[in-house]
Image (spheres, rainbow, N blue to C red):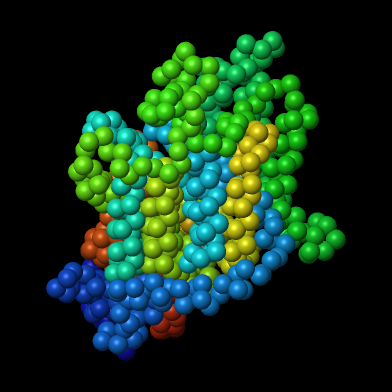
Amino acid sequence: MDFHHNLDSASDCCSDTSRREKQQTAGTLNLENPSSASECCSNTREKQGTAGTVFDNDENNFFNGRTTDTPEETKPNLSWGRGIKADWDRTVGTHWWKEMTNLEQKTIAVTIFMFFAAIAPAITFGAIYEKTTGHYIGAVEMLLATAWVGIVHSLIGGSAIMINGGTGPVLAFSAVLYKLSISMDVPFLTLSAWTGLWCMLFNVVAAFINLNKYILLATRFTDEIFSMLISVIFIINAVGSPFSPVGLYYYFDSEHTSHDANENDDGYSFLSVAFLSLVLAVGTTSFAVFLKAIKFARFFCNQWSRSTISDFAVPIAIFSFTAIDHLVFSSAKTETLNVPDTFAPTFACCDATCETYWPNDCTDLAEPFGRRPWLVDLSDLNGHLYIPFFAAIPAFLAFILVFLDNGITLHCISHPSHKLQHGDAYDLNTLIIGIMVGINAMFGMPWLVAATVRSLSHLHALAEKTQDGKFISVLETRLSNLAVHSLILGSIFCLPVLKLIPVPVLYGIFLYMGITSLTNNQFWGRFTMLFMQPSKFPSAAYTDYVSTTSMHKYTGIQLFLFASLYIIKSIKSIAIAFPIVIALCIPIRIYLLPRLFTQAELTLLDSGDENIEKWIEENVDNIDEELVEQGAKKEGSIISK
């Protein structure tokens, strides 16, 4: 066979196929696969159809996480509720008893860790809700919503690992809805209730018609951007956000609100508190990472003791540095969680109409008349009888936020690299979360959706991994989710106890969650390679078989989308567009990237281990020894090593 003839033909057909030059100790050696190069052309970068770009069948199988070998005419119809039933049968109907009885040591450790990881954002979001909704929704409503939604979802939800909670885009939407209610002279809770009910209806319809089939078009390209974004948000919020006075950096500002309660005390030094806060946060993170790594160390007498310490790494770090704060540095008043003193609706009324807030609107009253009722009066329209119908307009935007947040989070959780065995349940989750949004709206509570960082942290905490961070298996249990939210429900009745937790320790946990969730993100790995010498790149399919230029170009596109998403999410006035921009990553991957990269490059950059190994097996094994002997080099080969 004339290899050089084939190489020239391949080069003529695909002049922009990639190459990789990797420096080795004995010099540079390129192994070329002419059949692979020509295959890029014969298959083409994309198959043009009437509806647009269609990918290779094998690749679609992986991206969708479903088997598509079945002929199109025999595929099951998942519309009109069939998808919900299939989800139930595949998950709850099959694995519920096992997931409710598989109590292990890891379950207890994960429960303690996730309790702190879930309750701190709930209290924080509650405080922000109170400011942005005129005191109608606060920390008590957020804690109660978090507790009951989490308990119900842990019992009947399709994903045992998903954690629901408050998110930035939904908070931003609630703030916009409050301003809209003021401008329309309509009670906020009434408008919110009608909007929530419409949002529930849209989610129910979406679940029944299997709208989640479009979420399944997302690939690792989108998942990596989304996962990187939420990891970085947690890290930045722990260190110091440029868009809000949150994080360790602001303790060094004497005007920060955390110093207000103690600034007049004798001997109080904001710099001392700031440095102590930094030590507590960094110490908590470092100690948790150190203890987590003990599982693969040589210390202690046996593997059981090492595994136990590793499982309880985060709880040990939390309790250790909380004790240091209270026992060793008791004179330094670090910031504590700002929780209410009693369990009652946040809005305190000046009179029986409950239209004004005590004490702001009635300073002459020593005590409030009472609290707002829990159940929202849907008929309290202030004469605007069109509100029940008008609410469908903002509800549609809210539906997009809820639907995409839930779908993309579950897509990240269900990635094949995580080795989950109990299946996914997109339509079932959409139905259940949609109904819970409607119930929360009726009781004047915040709408909760899938909290991506907390969900992925839960996933990582339940996982067994290799020393380099690859998933081996995951303990798929409902018990940790159920226990976490049961503890949150119990904490509502002993709120002052939560004030014992130093906020800097919680910042340390957020920092830990952000850092550890980056370890398996290939986008992060390729981002760091932008600053590396090419010959020092770690060995991976996308470094061994894809040119450095193509790899950096792919990373650059992800980096641009990542930066755009972070900016949009951080600007409150446009934050509600955040999930919509995430959704745009899907058509960018489907229609734009195949025009910029070969099919082989996209397989190596945007597929899972199984597909990549299959591609390598089919292509690299065809390299003829003659090429090795000749040390043949050819510009444009997709395979170079």
Where residue 531 sits: x, y (%)? 45, 47
Along the line of sight, which residue is nearer the eye, 392 or 316? 392
Q: Give the residue displayed 26% in from the left and 58% down from the top.
A: 588
Report whether residue 36 is seen. no
Q: Quadrant of residue 270?
A: top right
Q: Give the residue displayed 42% in from the left and 61% down from the top.
A: 432
Along the line of sight, which residue is nearer the eye, 631 or 495? 495
Q: Quadrant of the C terminus?
A: bottom left
Q: How many marks?
A: 0
Q: Quadrant of residue 386?
A: top left
Where residue 250 sits: x, y (%)? 52, 25
- Up the image or down, 131 lies above or below 24; here it is above
Q: Quadrant of residue 381?
A: top left
Where residue 373 sits: x, y (%)? 45, 38
Q: Is residue 542 left or right of residue 101?
A: left
- Up the image or down, 529 lies above or below 160; here it is above
Q: Give the residue displayed 39% in from the left and 80% down from the top.
A: 67
Along the line of sight, which residue is nearer the eye, 454 or 483? 483
Q: Give the residue displayed 30% in from the left and 64% down from the top.
A: 206
Residue extending furthest right?
A: 301
Where residue 138 sits: x, y (%)? 48, 35
Residue extending furthest front?
A: 352
